[in-house]
Image: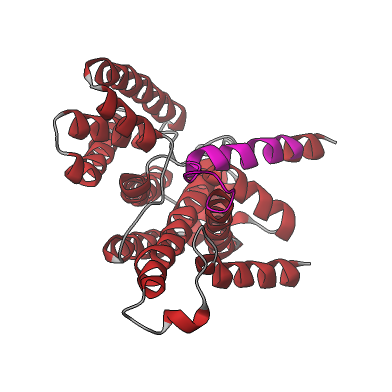
Amino acid sequence: MKKVILLFALVLLVIAPFFGQIDLPLSSLLEPDNMEHKVFFDIRLPRVLLAFFVGGILALGGLIFQTVFRNPMSTPFTLGVASGATLFTAIAIVLGFSALSPLFAFGGAMMTVIILFIVASRFNAYDSTSLLLVGIALSFFYAAALMVMFYISSLQESYEIMRFTMGSLDIVGFENIIILTFASAFLLTVILRYRYELKLLLTSYEFAYLKGIDVKKTNYILLFAVSVAVGVAVSFTGPIGFVGLIIPHILKNIYKQSADKLIFPIFFYGGVFLVTSDLIARNLGTASDIPIGVLTSFLGAPFFIYLLIKGRK
């Protein structure tokens, strides 16, 4: 069963760039002057790679957040990183700096991380619940500020902000892919470095303490790495929900292994899930692509409810 799923996923990744509103004959792809060649290498292929890396970052981020906060409903957006990125994107749009919105978004995400760790440094001891509550409070604050941005923006600016909040994989060229590759490599490197600590944290904080693990330091490093990588991803695509929530749960059900052994599978299938969602969004025959964040919610919510019901039985 696992080999069949893996084979299907690999085939899907290979064929994904060939499907869309424009047919791309193989004979035309090798001729650089053809429109089909430019569509494939400048739009389709970068879009698939973008979806793969962003999906992998969000899925792996979900695993880490669920482990650190010991809450199966945690997502990479729990601490307000995506909300900060969204607010600063709205600010960039309203101020007339739409071209710099990815930079503003990343700045908003990093500002959120800095605020979180400044507040966390005031705690006498590590308290994941308080950190989680701070993140939720920041999310509410950002949501209120975003409403102010909607209120003072023009109709066109409101549309641009709304489009960002629904997620988008529109991309041209490979410049952003290079940045996402480094972000993915950074996240994987940090998590693999703390793989042993992660295994102990999955048991309990007390057990990790007894094994000599500095739980506070480990958790903060993992949260920082995830927040930076997610901040990079969200700055390019906007917030894309449910990937970080459902993929770790699905993989745990399929593989029946400890989460510390599923780092690469969760990253890989998170990418495959978002590529599949994007493939569906691009081939529904609508006048324009359905926003990817909307589609992942449509696909993810019913399936996650099914998993919850099945798990309770």
Q: Residue 289's x, y, as percent? A: 48, 46
Q: Quadrant of residue 308?
A: top right
Residue lying at 50% horizontally and 67% vertically, measured from the top left: 17
Asked if one can make out residue 137 in the rendered structure from this viewpoint, the answer is: yes
Q: Magenta part mainly helix, strand or loop?
A: helix
**Is 275 left or right of 164, judged from the image as shown?**
right
**Is 34 left or right of 268, judged from the image as shown?**
left
Number of marks drawn = 0
- 8 or 251, which is in the foreground? 8
The C terminus sits in image quarter? top right
Vertical placement of residue 32 versus 187, above or below:
below
Vertical placement of residue 210 versus 83, above or below:
below
- 158 or 226, which is in the foreground? 158
Residue lying at 57% horizontally and 48% vertically, measured from the top left: 285
- 173 or 261, which is in the foreground? 173
Q: Residue 301's x, y, as percent? A: 64, 35
Residue 296 colored magenta? yes
Q: Quadrant of residue 95?
A: top left
Residue lying at 27% horizontally and 15% vertically, measured from the top left: 151
Residue 86 colored magenta? no
Name, please, the residue furthest toward the right: 313
Vertical placement of residue 260 versus 113, above or below:
below
Vertical placement of residue 10 versus 168, above or below:
below
Q: Residue 299's x, y, as percent? A: 64, 42
Q: Residue 312's x, y, as percent? A: 80, 34
Q: Which residues are magenta?
A: 282-306
Rendered image coloring scheme: secondary structure
Asked if one can make out residue 193 in the rendered structure from this viewpoint, the answer is: no
Residue lying at 41% horizontally and 59% vertically, measured from the top left: 50
The N terminus sits in image quarter? bottom right
